[in-house]
Each structure stands twice: as C-alpha cells, then as structure tokens.
Amino acid sequence: MVKSDLPFGSEFSPTLLELPRVLELAKEHDGDVKALQAAIRVEYFERNQTSSQNKDKLAMNARLGMKAYGVIDSEARLTDFGERLYDIRGDSAQLYAELARHILLRLNGMALIQCVQDIQASGERVGLVRLRESLLQRGISFPRGGKHPSMMRLWLERAGIFRSEWNVDEARLHDVLGTPPEIMDALTLLTSEQRSYLKALINLGGPGPYWSNEVEKLATAAYGTKFNEKNLPKQVLYPLEKAHLIALARGTKESGRGAKPFLVKWTDTLSASIVVPLLEQIDKMILPAIRPLVRQSLAEIRTNIEDGNTHVKGLALEALGFKLMRLIDLDYVATRLRGDQTGGAEVDLLFESTRLVFSRWQVQCKNTAHVSLDDVAKEVGLIHLLKSNVIVVVSTGLIGTEARRFAGKVMADTNLCVVLIDGDDLAAIEKTPASIVDVLNREARNAMKLKSLKQECSA
C-alpha cells in the first residue's frame, strides 16, 4: 500500500455513516474485527445494489477508516480518543468539534487548511489534483486518485470549519482549535533552532521560568540541534519573544562571573497541547518558513528582501526563487544554501521537471547590486555534482557584461543552458507575472543562437 500522510477515509464518511452509531457498534463489538465489520455492513451497506463481496469490502473500508482516524486500533478496540468520542456522542456539536480538533492537530489537518488557503490566495480553483501537487510541495503525500482530502473536508465541514466546498470559516477554526489560526503561520516562520528550543521548553512540563542555557542544553540533547551560544539571544530568544511565544527576564549578575543567562517562560499563547502537534506537522513539511511569504505578491516579497533582519531577508529571497519557478510549474527538490546563512545575500535552490524530458534546474537568487563572472562560474562548477541541465541566476540588481559573456561561452561550448534574470526582469514579472514566459523565451532564443553559431563554425 502506498504511504499516505493523510488518513485513509473512503467509506468512513459522514455522508455514509452516523458517527455516534458507529462508535456504539465499536463499543458493542469491542476487539472483534469480524463482528464490527459485519455490524457496519448490516447497518449501512446491506441495501446497496452491489455484490455481497463488495458489501464486505465497503464495511472493511469503513473500519479501516475508523482506524486511520485513530478512533479504533487494529484489533477494533476503541482508542483513548475513541473512548472520548463515545462519551460525548450524545452532544453532536461537541462530538464533531472534538473530531475536527483531532484532525487539525494530529492528522495534518492544519497543513491541509494552509494548502487550501494558499491555492485560493493564488486565485486558483481547489481540486484534488491541485491539492495533491500543493501538498507534495510541503512534503505531504496521499495516493494518486485518493479521496483523502475530501473525506477530511467532510468531517471538518460537520464541525463548521468549512462553510461550503473548500471555504474556511476562520472564526470557527479559531473556536475549534482553541487558539488563533495565525499561530500556525507564526510557528512556520521559526527557524529549526527556534522550533527545537521551543519544543525543549515545552518538554520541561510547566510554564517556568527556566534558565535559558538549561533549555538550550535540553534542546541539543533531545534534537541534536547545535546552537551558537554567544548569539542565542539574537538568533533564538528574541525572535521567540517577538512572536509572543516566550517571555524573557534578565538574570542577575554575580561577582566575577559576568551576566547570568536569561530566565525564560511560556506565554499564554503557548499551549503545549496545541503547539507540540503543530510543530510536529511543521517539522515534516518542506520549506515551512517561506510558506507565508509565498502567499504574498512578488512586490511584497521584494520589499521583504530589503528588510533589515537578515533572517527575514534570506527567507524572502528563498520565497522569490520558489515563486518564480512555480510560475512555470517546476517541482521543488531542495535548498542547497539558505539566504539566512549568507546574511540574506544569496540562496540556491533545485527544481525539476518531467514534462517531455527530465530536466534539473539549479537556481541561484542574489540580493546584490552586481552579479559577476565569478558568481556564474561558481554555479557552472557545481553542475557535475548536482547533475543540472539548467542554471538560473536571479539578481535583484544588475548582471554584469563579463558574467553575460561567460554564460554565453558556457552555452556555446556545452549542452548547458544558463538563464539570467536581472532586476529589470523582476520588475516586469512583478507587474505581469506571465511575462516570465517572455523572459525565458528570450533566454532560450539566445541559447539557441549561441549553439547554432557553434555548429556553423564547427562545420
């Protein structure tokens, strides 16, 4: 069976089953798989105009869906979560809200919500094919042709989180989740070090306060995260405080020992029962930190590139490269060098395409006034390691004459294509995103001209 990061639903659907009743059937046939499936078949599928074998399959799928959603275990016994649902089965509103909260926090439901909102923000229509592509970009998969997101939507709709089709009711989402939905965006903007530190703080079991260096030691031991001790406040503590996730207090000085570490404690925003499962979802996702930025326009992203904070600047540069390549529907593979590692000056990403033929695109985004020959040469030197077919150099500034001449020579002498996108091109794409096609066509014609000239000279 193909691995799925979303639960198998199939016949475990509110349009086919009554949740209070199937909970009662699970309680009645506790631990008896065959008896539970038979009871589900009699209750819900016996009157279907289909074969007896197919009726058995439908009942089995319903049981497997209950298991995938964490209601029962593999032996058809109610789980602790299933028992909670059973106890409140008489209160419909509470029942569906509890199931929805479980879906949001434990079954990648918030990732699905984000994905839906991202697609809608881009002006596209939400459908299963588009959802599958968008979820894959986040590292979340479900089988091709599977109805997993649709089943989740139906259960979330019962709780009022989806009003109709894929339209999210933000107020209801807030009520069910028990915290502002924006918490997911705040958490995705954190670096991996900040997330590890936050999880370590939560692991201590109470709001604190705790010494900041003791939390750091725990994060290193638990998650293998390496921290820069001298820059811990700037890189970890202050950003978490700014996001209202922690509160800091200065330690007192001791004679001959210098300043003590900070005292750190949770804020009211930090609910362990909510934040921990959300962080677990984020840890599984690809490029979680740039997700809020990708929803922005190119103009907003370019504004963030000029931010005084190097981390924000680096993420914005990464988002720029990601957004440009997604405009032409390339598939993200990896980030080789992040902007926050270079003070927000550059970032390298890899994309691939399998349309007609396989191609790998090596993309460098530079937030510098000038791209030199050496900048292009460095990317050319990596093609054998990365097995790239196309190099894309994106600059918010100018691409120098020597750099362009060198790129031309590389294309004339090899089968490599080098695409150069400068600040003027970005301004045009910002105004009309579709103009990226014109930019790429221009570069393609240039490459074809160079390669045909080489062939003529060789003849």
Image (spheres, rainbow, N blue to C red):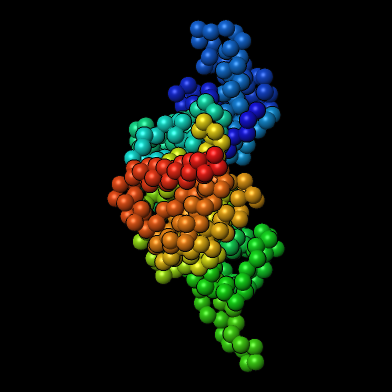
* Place of residue 450 in the rendered image (x, y in percent of width and height, measured from the top left): 47, 46
Front-most of 345 and 86?
A: 345
**Whole-percent x, y for residue 53 in the image:** 61, 10
Q: Residue at x 49, y 49 (%)?
A: 418
Position of 15 relative to 139 (above/below): above
Q: Residue at x 44, y 68 (%)?
A: 309
Image quadrant in which you'd find residue 24: top right
In this image, 248 relative to 121: left or right? right
**Of 452 and 186, which appears nearest the observer?**
452
Relative to residue 55, is residue 154 drawn left or right? left
Residue 9: x and y, percent?
Answer: 54, 28
Query: Is residue 227 something one can see in this rendering?
Result: yes
Q: Is residue 109 left or right of residue 197?
A: left
Q: Which residue lies at the image location 48% right of the left edge and 59% below the top edge? A: 403
The N terminus lies in quadrant: top right
* Placement of 343 over or under 149, stated as above or below: below
Is there any visible trace of residue 292 in the rendered image? no
Q: Which quadrant is home to the C terminus?
A: top right
Closer to the camera, 451 or 85? Answer: 451
Image coordinates for residue 76, horizontal then vertical, percent = 65, 28
Give the total number of marks visible in the rendering: 0
